[in-house]
Amino acid sequence: MSVKRAAHPELDIVVPCYNEESVLPALISCIQSLDLGVRLRVVFVDDGSTDGTHTLLTKACQEDARFACLSFSRNFGHQTAVTAGLQHAKGDIVAVIDADMQDPPELLSDFVDRWREGYDVVYGVRTQRQESWPLRMAYRLFYRALSLTADIDIPQDAGDFALMDKRVVDIINSMPEHNRFVRGLRRWAGFRQIGIPYARPRRLSGRSKYNVNRLARLAFDGLLSFSSAPLRVAAWLGSGAAVLGFCYLVYAITSFSLGGGAPEGWTSTIAVILLLGGVQLLVLGIVGEYLGRIFEEVKGRPQFVIRSKSGWLGQ
Ligand code: UDP
Ligand code: MG
């Protein structure tokens, strides 16, 4: 692969932070001790934190000229924070890492090497997780469902931890959608992509900001924005019900003509009504999920509101 790469590229690291005061000092000193052979800058995105995160970040920006911080007016969510960071990063390469050290910053050195080899997107693939087993099962199920339904081949067990060439970042930034599943958009952009396996450690301290509701929402965003397959469920269920209904009709007519008399039929009638009613509600729910997302898009509100900027972004 012969691709010309800048000899002294600039790497911007995007770090979404929501109430991360307990991990930020460790992350900041880890980033400061990195030696990646590139010019390094960091964009912290303070996603409406209510603890000391903002104060810590403002201080870090005053002490280190390579740091910048964007603060949202309220909590807009992880994917939106990543989106804002990508829009403000200007480097030849841009990396995205979590604040809680679950995406080890020292791995970026391998990522940069791969970029120099000619890859445009280098992403981390989680080989091991430390979460509880029901959660691990849920992640597994989700990624399998995603690969079954998605129109593009989204890699399994790959999160937002990645390093991207500027041209990929420009493409992601040009996508206007509001329900953003950044790892899917990154895949959609194409170019040369490669996954690097790594064991995902536990978060250094503090608690995960994703509760079951938020995880489910992210999962739905992923499934619904990369596939219209769920809409096809209606057609499949409808055909199945029609075939079953037809079989039952044949059975009823046959048994009637063979002298079985008119069937009593209450149980079967109720069963059919319940089954069809359930199927119709399910399908309506699926259509509603898409409709809700279309509603979000057509409103066209800004994806986030910035309260303040500091560090090199503030100048
Ligand atoms: N995060 C954020 N906004 C949110 C929730 C999370 O910016 O509304 C950040 C958080 O500070 C962390 C990253 O997104 O840097 C991943 O969140 P978390 O570690 O809680 O998720 P998990 O690793 O458990 O999936
Ligand atoms: Mg985490």
Image (spheres, helix red, strand yellow):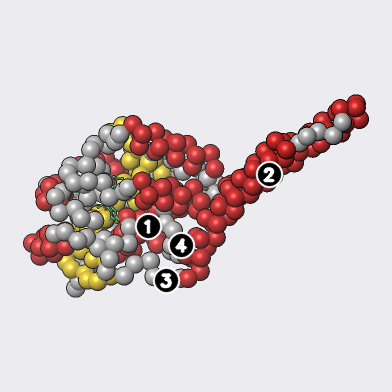
- Indicate the position of residue 70 as horizontal and vertical percent values: 24, 65
Tell me how far mark 2 sits from mark 3, CA to CA.
Answer: 42 Å
Q: Which mark is residue 273?
A: 2
- Indicate the position of residue 203 as horizontal and vertical percent values: 22, 42
Tell me how far mark 4 sits from mark 3, CA to CA.
Answer: 11 Å
Tell me how far mark 4 sits from mark 2, CA to CA.
Answer: 39 Å
Q: Which mark is residue 186?
A: none
Q: Of callouts 2 and 3, which one flags the residue occurring earlier in the amino acid sequence?
A: 2
- Indicate the position of residue 308 as horizontal and vertical percent values: 22, 71
Q: Can you identify the residue that label 3 sits on?
A: 301
Looking at the rendered structure, the number of numbered marks drawn on it comes to 4
Give the amino acid at mark 4. Glu
Q: Can you identify the residue that label 1 sits on?
A: 169
- Indicate the position of residue 301 as horizontal and vertical percent values: 42, 71
Of the two numbered discs 1 and 4 in the rendering, the one whose residue sits closer to the viewer: 4
Binning the other alpha carbons within 10 Å of mark 2 as few (below 14), some (14 to 19) or many (20 upward) gives: few
Of the two numbered discs 4 and 2 in the rendering, the one whose residue sits closer to the viewer: 2
Give the amino acid at mark 3. Arg
Indicate left or right for 111 with 280 as reference. left
